[in-house]
Amino acid sequence: MHTNGTRSELFENLRLELRRGCLAVAVLGQLGTELYGYAIRKALSDQGLAIDENTLYPLLRRLESQGLLVSQWREEDKRNKRFYRISPAGEEVLASLLAEWRQMNSALERILAVPAVSPEEQKQ
Amino acid sequence: MSNSELINRYLNAVRPWLPRKQQADILAELAEDLQSQIEERESAAGRTLTLDELAAVLKQRGSPLRVASGYLPQERLINPAMLPIYFLVLRVVLLWVLLPILILVSLAPIVQSGHPLAASLRFLAAVWQTPFFVIGIITTIFFLVDRYQDRWVDRWDPRKLPRVPASHPQMQWHNDFAGFAFGSAMAFFWAVTMWHRSAFVLDNGLRIGLVRVWGELYWLILVLTASRAAVNLYCFLRPAWNAARSWIRLALDGVEIAFAMVLLKVPNWVEISGPKVAPADASKLVGLANGAMQLALVSIPVILAFDVYRQGRLLRRAKDGQSAPILTLS
């Protein structure tokens, strides 16, 4: 049996796994318009998807190194900021990911719509 | 300390952990993000952040190593799927190969030393690096296997997978028969030849004297050799494995290991003398005979340790139900 501590740790691990792929989709989706790091974080947070800085910036670099984002340093408000935008390749991948996500989401909805059957009911 | 200095200290602490080529770029972006965050807080508070508030912001961001770790390549030394076999190999090599070798090498000097504790410590000081060296070699091999496994991991044939062990493994009858024959002969020889004997005298007058311990242990040795022969006979007649059979063998192994260890503490097992043998030659012969005896006594626990391992494995496999078929197709 799980104690409360291990259960919350278990939940946290599963939550992180669940979020990992979704965050990449969210960032790609957000960067249809050019934004810098702090603004990306604010925009995602304002829409209900809080993301840690230590997750966002490495993710941005990874997506850029994979050719899904492009970036450039530019001055704004007298400060140099690195602006990111989705690349054409990123748009294609995003479309495929969204199709995959929608398919998975509808499958999950169907699975979860089926009422749970207890082992006793199964025996009957 | 100023706020600016605190931020620079933080950024400087992150720097050494970052990939060299991207250091400047990552730090510039990190600095910009921190600045944006601080500005927002200052704008909400209507004042400059205090040093404590700024320290709290940095603390919340995470330790320099944690921040940098996100930018580092996610590498592993060994494939997690290989970890069970890695630990198994480590266990087998360390416990069943290295440990018996170390015991074998160390026993004679320790037992013969006048100060066994000091001799043990000297031995440990000389060999303590060996396990680490062995672990290093095994880890390196697994690392290389993990690196190059793509070349062979998918080359497999379901028909060439190892056979599932039979639910009641049949032991090798010739081993048991040989054990019975040898054990019976040994028990017979011991019972007849060694009864009340203190020496063997050869035709040329050479006298091989047996030290007193052999007489004291006469009955114990006879019981042990006869028991071993009886167990081997039982195993030969009932080749199907059962748990009792392993437990009996384990008990006998344990007693014999203890017996060999006790006997090893005896300084000399034979004495040689004769009218035609010079004292120097006699001394050499005694040295040779006792050396051979010592080697024989040391090899007993090592050989028996393998049997202990084998019987333990059989018992564990039976307990885990590993030998039961998983699926039966109708």
Image (spheres, coloured by chain):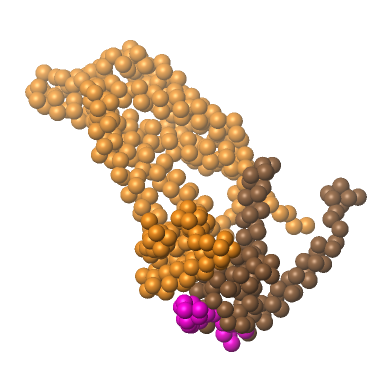
**Magenta segment, principal secondary structure?**
strand
Q: Nearer the viewer, residue A17 or A83?
A: A83
Q: Which chain is brown?
A: A
**Is residue B188 visible to us here?**
no
Residue A111 lies, with reference to residue B126, above or below; the image says: below
Quadrant in which the N terminus of chain B appears: bottom left
Location of residue B83 in the rendering, given as x and y in whole percent from the top left corner: 50, 54
Location of residue B284 in the rendering, given as x and y in whole percent from the top left corner: 14, 28
Location of residue B328 in the rendering, given as x and y in whole percent from the top left corner: 73, 54
Q: Residue furthest front?
A: B46
Q: Which residues are magenta?
A: A71-91
Q: Nearer the viewer, residue B215 or A35?
A: A35
Q: Which chain is orange?
A: B
Q: Which residue lies at the image location 75% right of the left edge and 70% below the top edge?
A: A105
Location of residue A18 in the rendering, given as x and y in whole percent from the top left corner: 66, 63
Q: Which residue lies at the image location 50% right of the left edge and 31% below the top edge?
A: B250
Q: Is residue A85 magenta?
A: yes
